Image (cartoon, rainbow, N blue to C red):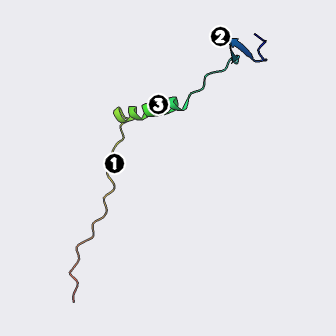
Amino acid sequence: MSKAPDGFHYVSRHIRRNPKPGSAKRMSGWMIAGLAAGIWLWGQVFGFGEASTTNPPTQPQPAVSAPAAR
């Protein structure tokens, strides 16, 4: 077997890239979508706080007036 290029090593006769030191695994798109769905479901089931339902202010009713003369 020949020497592997810089930054690579042999594993079972295959060339593999050396792991980078201290690299944290990033979150995949599916993981982010799953977290967003979980938060949404949590909000649907338990709610994010009781929102007080306020009635809209009542509109002033028009006063009764005399019928229009013809």
Percent coordinates x, y for residue 7 in the rendering: 76, 18
* Residue 61 is at least partly visible in this image: yes
Which mark is nearer the camera, 3 or 1?
A: 3
Tell me, for residue 34, which label it has, or none. 3
Residue that appears at 49% across and 33% down: 33
Which mark is nearer the camera, 1 or 2?
A: 2
Determine the image quadrant of residue 26. Answer: top right
Q: Is 63 situated left or right of 48 in this image? A: left
Percent coordinates x, y for residue 45 in the rendering: 34, 33
| Label 3 SS | helix
Of the numbered discs 3 and 1, the one sitting upstream in the chain is 3
| Label 1 SS | loop
Image position of 29 with respect to 5: above or below: below
- Three-letter code, disc 1: Thr
Q: CA distance from mark 3 to mark 1?
A: 34 Å
Split into 4 quadrants, where in the image is the N terminus? top right
Q: CA distance from mark 2 to mark 3?
A: 36 Å
- Three-letter code, disc 3: Gly
- Three-letter code, disc 2: Ser
Q: Residue beneath label 2, please?
A: 12
Q: Residue beneath label 1, please?
A: 54
Residue that appears at 39% across and 33% down: 41
Residue that appears at 30% across and 58% down: 58
Residue that appears at 51% across and 29% down: 31
Q: Nearer the viewer, residue 50 or 44?
A: 44
Image position of 21 with respect to 34: above or below: above
Q: Nearer the viewer, residue 56 or 1?
A: 1
